[in-house]
Image (cartoon, helix red, strand yellow):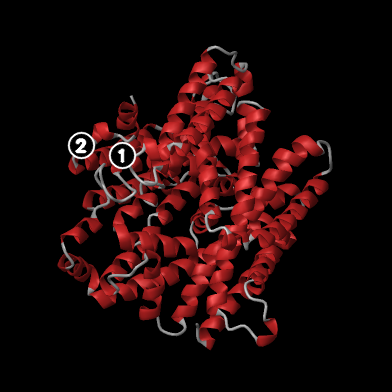
């Protein structure tokens, strides 16, 4: 439980974020303002927003826990699992998405391939985001319940925390759209970095700095020495063999996430010009490299300070209790809450965009005024918020649901990236090739997952499944494209890398 | 047959690759990306910039990112 000063810091932070987000209401006049922030965002805000939305309190606890159990190899996800993918996005994909004036990534797939691919991709993301929202709300509630001393008349456990989070995030996302989401994320990232680095700084002080940490770890035995190895052998006992990290994570999952994830790329589409769109990803990649410092080092420090914990996930909370004084503890909780709130606002705004642009405008009401689509976006935000609040307790009743949601998404990651990659580089890839590659890749993905115990030797082979489903999608797309008719070249201008420039168009 | 499939799916054919050459693969990847970034035409890099300044050169930004990550993987 927090002290009065800590609680004040957390509540002051929540109120401040809500007011700041609400302030951006005055900039919303059209659907473009709401979904793409009027295409006025600078690179620094977008980069910071991408980073903070990608990390939440669950990462602080979960990644620290994995670092406690396995060492620094979990840092691969933020280092090699981000930088190459974000550079590929910055220099190849994002400029084309931005120039095409897109609102959503499935919209690109629709233009490059056909509406079947667009709708399938869009519905996948909508379902994933909608159910993920409940899981994040639940995590926020658990978090707030442990730290706030609620007054007796509010004897409504869990729901009071869920509703408090929903009201704070809902108000600024509903009124301020993407501008509010991104600008509040900027503040949230600063708070998160200050809180996270404070824990690491105090932790290192306690264990005698880096040298002290290494020496104490060495004293703990030979098995602890591999904790400082980023690259693990193929037959490692950790879930992170270097083959999985290189093929599954670096080549597929990271790219699929940074290039195909609406919540990430939508911010870049809102950049004020093409240079800012590219720069936002490279700046984001730079900031992302500091995330492991905040989420991974606490796990290592806890290995030395609190050895023998039953669960790795206890490492981070134990460290907070040991290290942080009154006041700073409140700041760190505000930082963790910042991660959760930024994840919720991103999901709300991105899902509203996908629904309004890819489903509602495409299939339900094609010719309506811009004001109408703005209102649809806002109503969708509210409905999603209600859905998220109502489904939050499902995470409690069915603990496996969060894993199931992530697994559901992982079926699509490899195949979607295969058709994005082929689609942007090769004009010969056809609409039916993309469609078959997507469906075939997903089928392979599901088949591998269903037979994982008989096909794979490691316990959780998600890195391998994503790689092989990518390979399947890649091959099927090429084979079907060979036997089907491509789009006319002119139709692909602006959708295939440097095709227009090679033909002397736009130059 | 199943054993053969497992051998491929689990990358067991790479089991004999030691950590040092594996690390070389990672570092080599960063170098290749750096070279590819170098090959991008300058006009494409500066697209959207009205008055070019040296710090608008996104290749420098990308190399900074790559230098940082190269160092991390070189040390650990």
Q: With A63 as the anchor, is A394 left or right in this view?
A: right
Residue hosting label 1: A243
Q: Nearer the viewer, residue A356 or A504?
A: A356
Query: A497 or A466, which lies in front?
Result: A466
Q: Secondary structure at mark 2?
A: loop
Determine the CA span between mark 2 and mark 1: 10 Å
Counting other residues with Cα less than 10 Å from the Cα at mark 2, is it few (<14), some (14-19), or many (20 or more)?
A: few
Q: Which mark is residue B17?
A: 2
Q: Is residue A507 visible?
A: no
- Measured from the top left, where is residue A245 in percent x and y? 34, 43
Where on the picture, by quarter, is residue A69?
A: bottom left
Q: Are marks 2 and 1 on the same chain?
A: no
Q: Label 1: how many residues lie within 10 Å, few (<14), some (14-19) or many (20+)? A: many
Between residue A433 and residue A174, name the one nearer to us: A433
Which picture quadrant has residue A27? bottom right
Is residue A350 shown above or below A20?
A: above
Q: Residue at x 55, y 82 (%)?
A: A7
- Left or right of residue A472: residue B19: left
The residue at 53%/71% (across/down) is A143
């Amino acid at each position: 439980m927090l002290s009065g000063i800590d609680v004040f810091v957390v509540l002051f932070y929540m109120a401040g974020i809500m007011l700041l987000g609400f302030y951006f209401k005055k900039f919303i006049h059209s659907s473009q303002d709401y979904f793409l922030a009027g295409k006025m965002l600078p690179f620094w805000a977008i980069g910071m927003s991408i980073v903070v939305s990608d990390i939440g309190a669950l990462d602080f606890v979960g990644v620290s826990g994995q670092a406690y159990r396995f060492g620094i190899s979990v840092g691969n996800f933020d280092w090699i699992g981000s930088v190459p993918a974000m550079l590929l996005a910055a220099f190849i994909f994002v400029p084309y998405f931005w120039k095409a004036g897109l609102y959503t990534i499935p919209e690109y797939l629709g233009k490059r391939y056909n509406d079947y691919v667009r709708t399938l991709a869009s519905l996948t993301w909508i379902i994933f985001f909608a159910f993920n929202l409940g899981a994040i709300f639940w995590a926020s509630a658990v978090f707030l319940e442990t730290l706030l001393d609620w007054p007796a008349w509010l004897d409504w456990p869990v729901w009071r925390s869920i509703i408090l989070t929903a009201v704070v995030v809902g108000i600024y996302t509903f009124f301020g759209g993407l501008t509010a989401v991104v600008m509040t994320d900027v503040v949230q990232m600063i708070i998160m970095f200050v809180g996270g680095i404070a824990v690491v700084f105090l932790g290192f002080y306690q264990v005698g700095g880096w040298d002290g940490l290494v020496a104490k770890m060495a004293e703990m035995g030979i098995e602890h020495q591999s904790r400082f190895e980023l690259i693990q052998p193929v037959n490692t006992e950790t879930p992170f063999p270097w083959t999985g990290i290189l093929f599954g994570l670096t080549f597929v999952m990271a790219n699929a996430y940074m290039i195909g994830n609406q919540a990430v790329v939508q911010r870049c589409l809102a950049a004020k010009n093409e240079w800012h769109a590219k720069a936002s990803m490279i700046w984001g990649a730079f900031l992302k490299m500091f995330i492991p410092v905040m989420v991974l080092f606490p796990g290592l420090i806890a290995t030395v300070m609190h050895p023998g914990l039953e669960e790795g996930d206890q490492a981070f909370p134990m460290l907070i209790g040991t290290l942080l004084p009154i006041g700073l503890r409140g700041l760190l909780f505000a930082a963790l809450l910042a991660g959760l709130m930024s994840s919720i606002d991103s999901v709300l705004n991105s899902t509203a965009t996908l629904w309004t642009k890819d489903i509602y405008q495409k299939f339900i009401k094609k010719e309506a005024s811009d004001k109408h689509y703005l209102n649809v976006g806002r109503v969708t935000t509210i409905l999603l918020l209600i859905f998220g609040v109502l489904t939050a307790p499902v995470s409690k009743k069915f603990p496996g649901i969060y894993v199931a949601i992530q697994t559901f998404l992982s079926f699509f990651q490899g195949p979607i990236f295969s058709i994005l990659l082929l689609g942007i580089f090769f004009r010969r890839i056809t609409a039916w090739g993309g469609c078959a590659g997507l469906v075939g890749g997903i089928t392979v993905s599901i088949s591998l997952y269903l037979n994982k115990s008989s096909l794979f030797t490691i316990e959780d082979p998600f890195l391998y499944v994503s790689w092989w489903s990518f390979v399947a999608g890649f091959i099927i797309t090429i084979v079907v494209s060979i036997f089907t008719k491509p789009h006319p070249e002119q139709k692909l201008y602006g959708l295939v890398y440097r095709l227009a420039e090679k033909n002397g168009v736009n130059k | 047959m199943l054993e053969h499939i497992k051998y491929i799916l689990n990358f067991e054919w790479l089991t004999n690759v030691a950590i040092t050459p594996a690390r070389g693969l990672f570092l080599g990847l960063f170098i290749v990306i750096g070279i590819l970034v170098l090959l991008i035409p300058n006009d494409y890099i500066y697209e959207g910039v009205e008055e070019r300044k040296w710090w608008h050169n996104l290749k420098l930004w990308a190399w900074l990112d790559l230098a940082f990550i190269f160092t991390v993987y070189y040390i650990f």
